[in-house]
Image: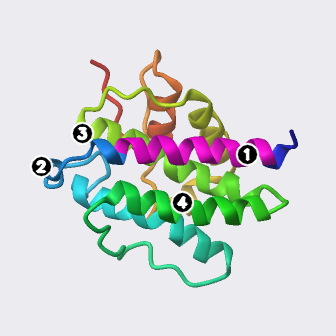
Amino acid sequence: MNAQTNAGSLLARAVEQTASLLDEVSPDDHDKPSTCSDWTVGELVRHVVASPQNFVDMFSGKEVDWANPPEPGDDPAATFRTRAEGLLEKVEADESGGSSSAALPEFAVHSWDLSRSIGSSTRLDDEVAEQALAFMSANLTPDNRSGAFGPEVEAPEDASVQDRLAAFAGRTVRTS
C-alpha cells in the first residue's frame, strides 16, 4: 500500500468513528455544552456534519464559510456519511496525500469533542489521533490557531494520545 492509500484509509476510519459518535447523539443532547468553547452539542453536530462538504469545497478552491454550517437534517449521521463519501472520493483522487492529512485532525479532534460532550464510552482510534497530532504539531503554530483552535493547554502527564491531541487543539482535558 502506498502512503496515500494508507492516509485515505486512516481518514475513512476517522470519518466512520465520527459517524458512529453522531449516531449516539440524541436530540436531548443538543442543548448541552460541548468541549468546544461557546458551542452546544447541537452546534458541534452542525459543524461536524458540514465539514466533509466544506473540505471538498476548500480542496476545489471554493470559498468556505466554516462559521455558518447548514442544518444537518433529521438524521445528522446519515447526512454526514453521505457528505463524507464525497470527501473520501476527493481524497482518493489527490495523489499528494495532502487532502487526507489536512482533513484528519478535524474528525479526530471533533470525535473527541463529541465523545466527551455526550459521555460516550466509544473507544476512539489511537492511530487516527496519533496521525492527527503529528500533522497538527507540524503545521499548527500560535500564529495560525485563531478561529479554529485555542492555545495549546497542558495535558496530564499520563494522558492518552486522544487527550494529548485535544489539549494540543486547546481543549481542557480532565482525568477522572
Q: Nearer the viewer, mark 3 or mark 4?
A: 4
Residue at x-position 60% and y-position 56%: 103
Mark on residue 28? Answer: 2
Q: How far apart are marks 4 and 1 (CA)?
A: 15 Å
**Type of residue at label 1?**
Ala
Could you tell me which quadrant the N terminus lies in? top right
Crowding at label 1, few (<14), some or many (≥20) Cα neighbours within 10 Å? many
Element at label 1: helix
Toward which corner of the image does residue 30 lie, by quadrant? bottom left
Q: How far apart are marks 1 and 3 (CA)?
A: 28 Å
Q: How is this picture coloured?
A: rainbow
**Type of residue at label 3?**
Ile
Q: Which of marks 3 and 4 is nearer the N terminus?
A: 4
**Type of residue at label 2?**
Asp
Q: In front: 84, or 105?
A: 84
Q: Left or right: 45 with respect to 139?
A: left
* Magenta stretch in the rendered image: 5-21
Toward which corner of the image does residue 35 lie, by quadrant? top left
Could you tell me which quadrant the C terminus lies in? top left
Residue at x-position 24% and y-position 32%: 119
Q: Distance between the residues labelled 4 and 2?
A: 25 Å
Residue at x-position 75% and y-position 59%: 92
Q: Which of marks 4 and 1 is nearer the N terminus?
A: 1
| Residue annotated with mark 1 | 7
